[in-house]
Image (cartoon, rainbow, N blue to C red):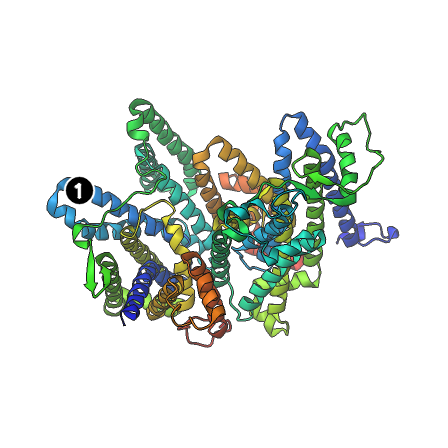
Amino acid sequence: MLEVLEVIFNGLSTGAVLLISSLGLAIVFGLMGVINLAHGELIMLGAYTTFLVQNVCKAFGSPWKESYIFFALILAFIVGAIAGLILERGVIRYLYGRPLETLLATWGVSLILQQFVRTVNWVLVIGIAIFCLLFFGGLWVLNRLPNFQQIRKWVITVMLPLSIGIAAVTGGFLSQTYKLAVTKPWFGAQGVAVTAPKWLFGGLNIGTLTLPYVRLFIIALTIACIIALYLFFQRTSWGLRIRAVTQNRSMSACLGIPTQKVDALTFALGSGLAGVAGVAISLLGSVAPNTGQNYIVNTFMVVVVGGVGKLVGSIVAALAIGTIDYIIASKALLPLVAASKPLTDLVEFFGSTDMAKVMVFALIIVFLQIKPGGLFPEKGRTVDA
Amino acid sequence: MGDEVLPKSRGMKPQQKRLLIEIAVVTAIALIVILFVPPMLVDLGQASRVNQLGRFLALAIVALGIDLIWGYTGLLSLGHGILFALGGYAIGMYLKLQIPPNASIQLPEFMSLYDVKELPGFWKPFYSFPFTLAAVVLLPTLLGGLLGYLVFRNRIKGVYFSILTQAATIVFFNFFNGQQGFFNGTNGLTDFKTINLGRWGTCIQSFYPSIKSWNINSWRLVVAPVCWISKEDINSEQTQFIFYTLTVLFLVAAYALCRWLTSGRFGRLLVAIRDDEPRVRFSGYNPTTFKVVVFAISAGLAGIAGALYTVQTGLISPKAMDIAFSIEMVIWVAVGGRASLSGAVLGAVLVNFAKSFLSEQFAATWLFFQGGLFLLVVLVLPDGLVGWLRSQPIQQIKTFIGIRPQVATYPRIEEDPEIQRERENLES
């Protein structure tokens, strides 16, 4: 009995991590058909935000130190949402209808974000700030000129190198004057550690079984996110609009729904959820610039198995993949197949975290032979079903 | 239009003529790359670049394969690293089995580290050179064909296909990484000693000194080839030059194959599948077969490239199955120009040289450059360099700066692409 409970709990907790990190991806993919390869890096940004919030709160002492996680949740959501918004407005909106190119572009963004986290220091931040101030501020000011549209290209060709130049010179000057104080990377290439607040230490004891509080917290957080999403989609007017655009984009546009705003909002929402997932993940281990890479493929598998456009698909898929993954990796089936030698060998062979992934992938391929559209495919008579 | 200008008396259609010109150009470039470039680089004191060029030309073969499936057929594979690595592992296993007969343990040395006493069964066929050569091509081809069949059969396509190939990358990475006793885990197969190239290897080898000291005055290519079967040191300059030559020859062969595939009916069907698959299906074709075949061919090319790359780097490790490496392959094609074979080759060589140069100069910032390259190619240059060169670059720069072209009639009519297209359609 206890073994069954253990399998269920561990499967549930693996599934919860999967689910919370794939929720945002599923929403965005359902609405826009865009696969965001930078999703893992948004998760990573959320985790780093947690690290920063933790350090700030530590400085304030006792009541803050224990409750930093809640501020981290809010802040991580905001950081993720802003990053997502910039990504959507700056890159993805030019690529709608070209999903494969979006894939490549977001991969480029993910590389840049990884390297950004590795090298970010005061010089870089100040340089970027100066550049944005000069370039976008300048454009904003010049936008008031009556003949702006005619001279736009000229303005950009002049302003772009100029702003970059000024930013670079300022950065060089700063690093010459203040030396290491401003050129030292904030995080570096090594991982940083987030310590869970004290009340998450330990676990709930049931007989010989211990359910760690951190895992329980993540499960609770995932459930909270799903409930919040459900309420948002079903009870708010923007939720209604998002659902409408997901079902039929051109019809919604005809009826006056601002699809561009809906796209931007959804993307920000999905990215914000990635940030929240980052908080959860930071509790599980150290946070490194390539943390996001460990999660993306699994989250994609959740989306593929779950099908497009339905939250329930993602939920079932994440829990199923999490449970199966755990069962295979932990060799939980060993007692059941003890009678037959080849089956035991098989279970032993796949009984590690790495090899479990191999098995899960094979199972997913088999599953897609039966249900190519995922668990809950879109209904309708499209040519390309 | 062009038919009337050409002299018909020579009995040659313009298509044939163009083909002959292309063959001549490709042959000339191949000869230059084999005979002139290595001595030139050595003269410049850049001897290490020869090996680099050889490796990048091997990568260009994968790029051709990716161009075939992505540029022409519209299937974005993010998992070609697997097929590349399979070819590499096949030849690597053969090379690891070149154990001197007097050695105490007749096993690749890493196996003793992991307590493997007996050679695993699937290693045994790799004692044979012909089997290895067949495996280099057939293993990736079969795997590609199988995966392609399982996926395309269900009409899974677009981003779904890309994601599945990407997941496959992770899976194979884990498999090769985890099986330390079989494949030496993270370190991969390395430290190759000798290779049995047989008779003709020695022939090329005897050419090598004359090519190395190549200059126009001493035409010393007429060397009596002394041929015998011997075991060669794989890292010697001569052997590496053989691999270099082989790589160029295979690249030319791959180019010819892709050219042949994409020029006829088959090629037109590929493009049709890319542009409107349902319509192809409704016209009575089965796109699945074509997609599986083209994916398998592309996989075979990746396998050959992997083998050639491995013998020139002396290392094959699961890192070749990294997601990042597989996506990089796609960007070579994107930079060069999709649906353009010369673009794929050009892109692979250019991007890789840029990579090695930039990561030598600014090690930390290469990822910034690479990420920027992805964004740039997708947002600004969707047709790649070749596509851009084809579309009158000078004119484009001028219009970008704001200088308008001199036009005979109204600018509205002359500059509207829609009207231009209609006009071309009317004329043709």
The front one of B220 and B103 is: B103
Residue A47, compared with residue A203, is above or below; it is above
Residue A16: give x, y in percent of width and height.
30, 62
Q: Chain of mark 1?
A: A
How many residues crowd around disc 1 within 10 Å: few (fewer than 14), some, or many (20 or more)?
some
The front one of A129 and A11 is: A11
Residue B232, compared with residue A257, is above or below; it is above
Q: Residue furthest top?
A: A177
The front one of B248 and B24 is: B248
Q: Residue furthest left?
A: A63
Residue A36 in which image quadrant: bottom left
Q: Where is mark 1, residue-wise? A: A58
Residue occupying image coordinates x 67% and y 57%: B262
Seen in the image, is B240 located left or right of residue B365? right
Residue B277: give x, y in percent of width and height.
57, 67
Residue A67: give x, y in percent of width and height.
16, 50
Residue A65: give x, y in percent of width and height.
15, 46
- Residue type highlighted by circle 1: Lys
Tell me the SS state at disc 1: helix
Residue occupying image coordinates x 53% and y 52%: B116
